[in-house]
Amino acid sequence: MSELYRADLFSVAGRAACVTGASSGIGRAIATTLAQAGARVVGLARRGAALEDWRAVAGGETAAVTADLSDASAIEAAAARAAQPFGPPEILVNAAGVNTREPADAVTDEGWRTTIDINLAAPFFLARALVPAMRERGWGRIVNIASLQSARAFPGGLAYGASKGGVAQLTRAMAEAWSRDGITANALAPGFFPTELTGPVFGDPALAAKHAAQTCIGRNGELADLAGPVLFLCSDSAGYVTGQILYVDGGYTAK
């Protein structure tokens, strides 16, 4: 009886989910985790072929929606398409992201706009489009992807850091706005994980080792490390957790 209770408490089985950035990296890992845990997952990203590659290995019930999240005018239509395969999403994970790594004095207008549009604006506009159905159901989970740069600065990260600092505050504001309707809003803030976005870090063994040494655990993240935290935040077990930034960083921010 107790084992069944625990399984149900952290279950996402049968839930309809939408994960942006599911074509690669952290988004792909999270989308796969949810699908393998029994959620019906719509992966939303710009690269259709990469989404189909994800579906081929994810297992479970999945669907793909291609959309350019840097185009705010396309987000309402993307949200509507994401609701077609399995019904309106009950879980939204905003994992799509970009990091131009432009030095502060060389940040371009295009780099700034693209970074803010994808990392900060798209999570809000997509959530705004999907919240009414969550509110009608009285249950919803929004998980944003924050960053170490939500709390501290790194070289070449002015635009990215500004966007991720904004994601942290956006998460708190979402929680204030929608939690009374049964919709929780939280964020995961990963440390250094091997993804396309962090290619320049892991392509430099000395730099990767430096970041590993900064953690309390003594290593950089592995994508499997995100599975438990995301399942927690997407399940009934996190029903009284909202407006929080959960750092999954091996203790990087503790030192």
Image: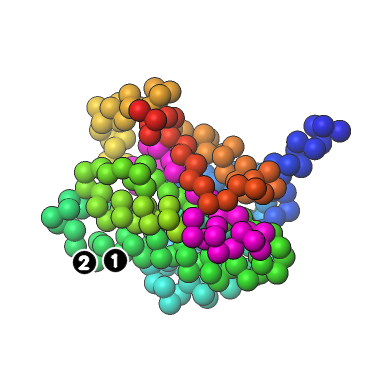
Q: What amino acid is found at the position of numbered circle 1 in the picture?
A: Arg
At a point 51% along the width and 75% down the height, the residue shown is 76
Q: Are marks 2 and 1 in contact (CB under 8 Å)?
A: yes
Quarter the N terminus occupies = top right
Q: Secondary structure at mark 2?
A: helix
Q: Nearer the viewer, residue 180 or 117?
A: 180
- Residue 39's place in the image compared with 228, above or below, is below
- Residue 109 has which mark? 2
Residue at which label 1 appears? 113
Point out the stretch of residues depicted in magenta: 172-198
Mark 1 neighbour class, 10 Å CA radius: few under 14, some 14 to 19, many 20 or more:
some
Q: Is residue 180 magenta?
A: yes
Mark 2 surroundings: few (<14), some (14-19) or many (≥20) residues within 10 A: few
Can residue 48 be seen here? no
The numbered dot on residue 26 is: none
Q: The C terminus appears in which quarter of the rendering?
A: top left
Residue drawn at the location 38% of the way across and 57% of the way down: 166
> Looking at the image, which residue is at 70% across and 55% down?
15
Where does the image place residue 227, in percent across and percent down from the top left?
A: 57, 39
Q: Is residue 147 above or below residue 94?
A: above
| Residue in the foreground of this view, choosing between 95 and 176 | 176
Residue 158 makes an appearance in the image: yes
Query: For numbered disc 1, what is the local secondary structure?
Result: helix
Residue 104: image x %, image y %?
17, 53
